[in-house]
Image: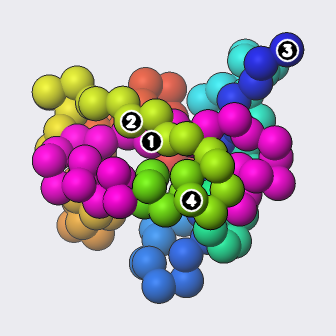
Amino acid sequence: MDEVIIGIGINDSKRTWFSTERRVEMVRQLYADEPRVTVAAYDGLTVDFAKEHGAQFIVRGIRTVRDFEYEETIADINRKLAGIETLLLFTEPELTSISSTVVRELLQFGKDVTPFLPQGLKLD
């Protein structure tokens, strides 16, 4: 049976609005009705997390040319380190301006971020 593992990376150099545990819980809520989706936090390289879980490939979303150039480089490194391929999915054009940085900034100023979140995600 195929499954999707959604990895929530822990990066101490990035400022997050929610704790790792809360981020994992929010994503789990989004996929609660999907028995083949697992959500887990990890520390370290994404490719190591993927390898530890027996992943055949990594799926990454890209919004811009800048994202593509960065992800292309990382995909090459991941292939060399672990033999794991990366699939790049382009976002819908109307979603290209949405990023976690933008959402955090809007939250900081007390703005409603609902239009920028997946449908059904609860921030409470």
- 71 falls in the magenta region: yes
Q: Position of residue 113 (x, y in %)?
A: 29, 45
Sequence-first disc among 1 and 2: 1
Tell whether label 2 touches label 1 (CB within 8 Å). Answer: yes
Residue 123 appears left or right of 20: left
Packing grade of label 3 (10 A; few <14, some 14-19, many >=20) is: few
Sequence-first disc among 3 and 2: 3
Sequence-first disc among 4 and 1: 1
Please give the label number shown on residue 112. none
| Residue matched to label 4 | 80
| Residue matched to label 1 | 60
| Residue matched to label 3 | 1
Q: CA distance from mark 3 to mark 2?
A: 23 Å
Query: Which segment is the magenta one?
Result: 48-73
As helix, strand or loop, the secondary structure at mark 4 comes to helix
Q: CA distance from mark 1 to mark 2?
A: 5 Å
| Residue matched to label 2 | 88
Above or below residue 107? Residue 53 is: above
Which of pointers 4 and 1 indicates the residue nearer the eye? 4
Where, quadrant-wise, is the N terminus in this rendering? top right
Residue type at numbered disc 1: Arg
Packing grade of label 2 (10 A; few <14, some 14-19, many >=20) is: some
Q: CA distance from mark 2 to mark 4?
A: 17 Å
Residue 110 shows in the view: no
Tell whether label 1 touches label 4 (CB within 8 Å). Answer: no
Residue depicted at x 66% and y 73%: 44
Q: Position of residue 55 (x, y in %)?
A: 73, 39
Residue type at numbered disc 4: Lys
Residue depicted at x 71% and y 50%: 50
